[in-house]
Image (spheres, helix red, strand yellow):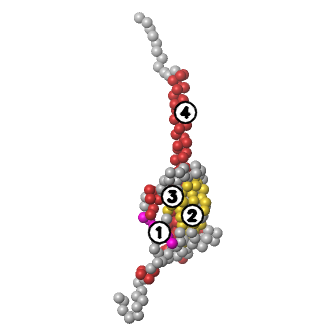
Amino acid sequence: MKNTKYLNGATLIEILVAAGIITIVGAAIIPSYRNYKMRSDLYLAVEQTQQLLRRAQLLSQTGKGDTIWGVHTGEGTLYSGASYGTRNIAFDEEIAVPPSVTVSGLTEVTFSRIYGVPNTEGDMIFTSLNGEQKTIQIRKDSVLSAPAFSSASSVFSSSSSSSISSVCQWWHGCGQNDDDDDDDDDDDDGDDD
């Protein structure tokens, strides 16, 4: 009878094959993860800016602090005052704009008291390092409304090109029939009907 002794373990070739497979899989996954992270940062920056815009508009409409409110997208700041340069720093609320996202176009907007109408029109363009873009349109004839932003699919639409563009429009009818909402009865007959 032969006494054969087997060693349990992996050969050098098996270890090299396993290392090669791990390297190939890692090389395929890492770029995908980086693109995912850049896209996620882009969506996050747009969503947070939309929230700041809604908050600034609401604070202006309610007259909090007896002032108007605005948003400066370059710094990711909600501020109290007529402009970013003349703001009251004590009321600043900031978000961190991811470093992989740049903001161009309109970078500052304030909202009027009572009606919350933006002081300017323009597009806020958010661009990630991989070239994808998202756009928020600010129009004077519009107001931020929650239903337009209720789901990510209604906010962000994909296009067939390499860059993704979404347009968030804020429609409103504010200020068109201001007399309909008044509690005052403008007829002069003295009664309240």
Name the main secondary structure of what is drawn in magenta.
loop
Marks 4, 2: nearer the viewer: 2
Amino acid at circle 3? Ser
At horizontal 40% and vertical 88% (from top left) the residue drawn is 185
Residue at disc 4, secondary structure? helix
At horizontal 54% and vertical 50% (from top left) the residue drawn is 162
Give the Cα separation between the discs numbered 1 and 4. 51 Å
Could you say where residue 124 lies in the image, as x and y percent from the top left? 57, 62
Dot 3 or dot 4: first in sequence order is: 4
At horizontal 53% and vertical 22% (from top left) the residue drawn is 13
Dot 4 or dot 2: first in sequence order is: 4
Q: Residue at label 3? A: 166
Give the Cα separation between the discs numbered 3 and 4. 37 Å
Q: Residue at label 2? A: 123
Q: Quadrant of residue 45?
A: bottom right
Q: Residue at label 1? A: 171
Dot 1 or dot 4: first in sequence order is: 4
Marks 3, 4: nearer the viewer: 3
Amino acid at circle 4? Thr
Dot 1 or dot 2: first in sequence order is: 2
